[in-house]
Amino acid sequence: MPDFLEAETEELALEKLHEMGCTDGLPVVIPSQERVERLILATGLDGDMVLGEMGPGMGMATIEKVCVAAVMAGCLPDYMPIVIKLVFVFSCIVDRPPHNFFLLLVHVYHQKLSIF
């Protein structure tokens, strides 16, 4: 992980995440290096692989960044292949009409999420 948040306890780390505006106010799991690496491993992909551009800040979504967010949301490793593929789909519809999103989801469903 390129940027580390240092805190003496997970409770203090959680407070820092809230102060930094990195949460939506709901409970989060602290994205420790071990937790993030476990989810990266579950994807079967390299952590620095770019999935695409994502809103609202139009930043690059990498496997690692998606895994950090997934850890914070409490995602299980078994779900990561689906999460990664859905992030890829979302990145494909940036600045496109909403109906394209529905068509992409139908396509992904019929392809059994075999985007990669």
Image (cartoon, grey):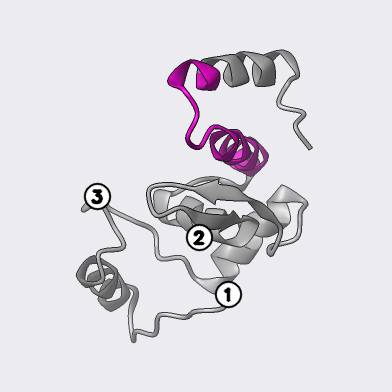
Looking at the picture, tell me which residue is in the foreground, 86 or 28. Answer: 86
Say which residue appears at 43% left-offset and 47% top-offset: 55
Left or right of 9: which side holds 86?
A: right
Q: Amino acid at mark 2?
A: Val
Residue 97, given in percent of the width and then of the height, sits at 46, 22
Image quadrant occupied by the N terminus: bottom right
The disc label shown at residue 68, or none: 2
Q: Residues within 10 Å of mark 3 (few under 14, many from 20)?
A: few
Image quadrant occupied by the C terminus: top right
- Mark 1 and mark 3 residues within 8 Å of each other at the beta carbon: no
Q: Is residue 55 above or below residue 89?
A: below
Q: Amino acid at mark 3?
A: Leu
Q: CA distance from mark 2 to mark 3?
A: 16 Å
Please report the bounds of the magenta region as a residue range.
78-101
Residue 4, given in percent of the width and then of the height, sits at 47, 80
Q: Amino acid at mark 1?
A: Met
Q: Is residue 80 magenta?
A: yes
Say which residue appears at 41% left-offset and 49% top-offset: 73
Q: Mark 3 = which residue?
A: 26
Q: Regarding mark 1 in the picture, which secondary structure is present there?
A: loop
The disc label shown at residue 1, or none: 1
The disc label shown at residue 99, or none: none
Residue 36, given in percent of the width and then of the height, sits at 57, 63
